[in-house]
Image: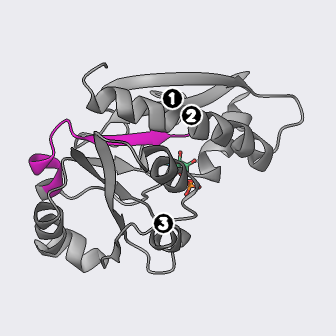
Amino acid sequence: MKRLAIFASGTGSNAKQLIDYFSGNKDISVALLVSNRKEARALEIARNSNVPAVNFTKEEFYNSSTVIEKLVSEKIDFIVLAGFLIKIPDNILKAYENKIINIHPALLPDFGGKGMYGLNVHKAVIESGKKESGITIHLVNEHYDEGRILYQAKCPVLENDTAEILATRVQELEHRYFPEVVEHFISGKL
Ligand code: GAR
């Protein structure tokens, strides 16, 4: 059995999809949800599904071994970032090399990097005049949004799109593909 930790900072709609998808799976389980914001709805979503959920302060992430100790004590094999908006500390990157998967709401390598999350991304896409956007699921390394791409899916950017409308279209792709891509990667198919 491979044990996943989901890291999430916000609403947790992708966390919910992942938890539901893997519930009852005999090879992969969501064993922990980690957040950096104690008010994140993702924590509540996890607890409602009986997934242990913990919040850590920035201090604990960057200046202590508290988080890595928790991951080790929970025997976590893979980490899935589902809207996790702070940089992964080096000690976690080292311990989980090629075992951290992120989802980004645009077609990398465009519209990635520091500060590119949530609506900022969709605003930038609309301002660029691009006719397509989508999702990128990729491995995480020490550079923001630059790890190996595992999967991309596209959707159109329409004439009258606002960032919010485009966000909804992109999230439909996220919910449809993210859990399956995580499963394929963990089972060695990607
Ligand atoms: C998702 O759209 C995800 O792609 C994005 O945050 C959102 C979280 O939504 N991540 C990034 O922008 C990372 N750079 P959710 O909390 O509803 O799952």
- Which of the two marks, 2 or 1, is nearer to us in this view? 2
Task: Decide whether residue 99 is among the magenta residues.
Answer: yes
Q: What mark, if any, has residue 91 been given in the picture? A: none
**How far, Cα to Cα, is label 2 from label 3?**
29 Å
Residue at image x 87%, y 29%? 159
Q: In x, y percent, where is residue 150? A: 37, 24
In what element is the residue under mark 3? loop
Residue at image x 35%, y 48%? 80
Residue where numbered disc 2 is placed? 106
Residue where numbered disc 3 is placed? 49
Residue 92 occupies which quadrant of the picture?
bottom left
Q: In x, y percent, where is residue 110? A: 51, 29
Residue where numbered disc 1 is placed? 110
Q: Amino acid at mark 2?
A: Ala
Q: Which residues are magenta?
A: 92-105
Q: Are marks 2 and 1 in contact (CB under 8 Å)?
A: yes
Q: Is residue 175 above or below residue 43?
A: above
